[in-house]
Image: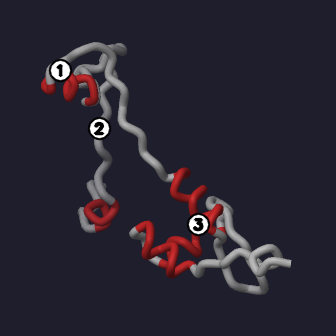
Amino acid sequence: MPKDQGALPPLHRPADIAKAIGMSEWWVKEQARRGRIPFTKPGRAYRFTAEQFAEIVRMYEVRPVAVAGPQTRVAAVAVLKKPVRDPQPTRSGVRLQARVPRRAALHQPDAA
């Protein structure tokens, strides 16, 4: 039997994964604890196979936003900005008023 057939896959520690993706070891353990990333847990320690690491990288991959049609840089940036909200409410002019903070209300003399 060849040497590689019965060999187990190497398991990587959270510190190795954290260093490779630029996050803290605590973050990797917390994501595994919450079930957000795949992991292997022999005993009480989190470990990761090469396939699991590749899946984690794919999960947090960010793809570029596709903008339809040829546009200038200024127009493309304008598409990505949030729309400006109208400062005036469109409903029947109900105007909210801030309440007096508790600390200020406690130190005011009673008007009685």
User: Image height check: is 73 above or below 48?
Assistant: above
Residue occupying image coordinates x 80% and y 77%? 2
Element under disc 3? helix
Residue at mark 3: 31
- Given residues 52 and 41, the one toward you in this image is 52
Query: Looking at the image, is mark 1 or mark 3 earlier in the sequence?
Result: 3
Q: Position of residue 86 (x, y in %)?
A: 24, 20
Q: Position of residue 70 (x, y in %)?
A: 23, 15
Residue at mark 1: 75
Which residue is farthest right?
A: 1
Mark 1–mark 3 distance (CA, rounded to whole Å) = 38 Å
Q: Position of residue 59 (x, y in %)?
A: 55, 51
User: Image height check: is 70 above or below 64?
Assistant: above
Circles 1 and 2 in contact, beta carbons < 8 Å: no
Q: Which amino acid does label 3 sit on?
A: Gln
Mark 1–mark 2 distance (CA, rounded to whole Å) = 39 Å
The quadrant of the rendering that contains the C terminus is bottom left
Tell me the crowding category of disc 2: few under 14, some 14 to 19, or many 20 or more residues within 10 angstroms, Cα based: few
> Which one is closest to the eye, mark 3 or mark 2?
3
Query: Looking at the image, is mark 3 or mark 2 earlier in the sequence?
Result: 3
Task: Say the numbered circle drawn on residue 97.
Answer: 2
Task: Say the numbered circle drawn on residue 58.
Answer: none
Element under disc 2? loop
Q: Position of residue 84 (x, y in %)?
A: 23, 25
Quarter assignment of residue 83? top left
Q: Which amino acid does label 2 sit on?
A: Gln
Residue occupying image coordinates x 53% and y 51%? 58
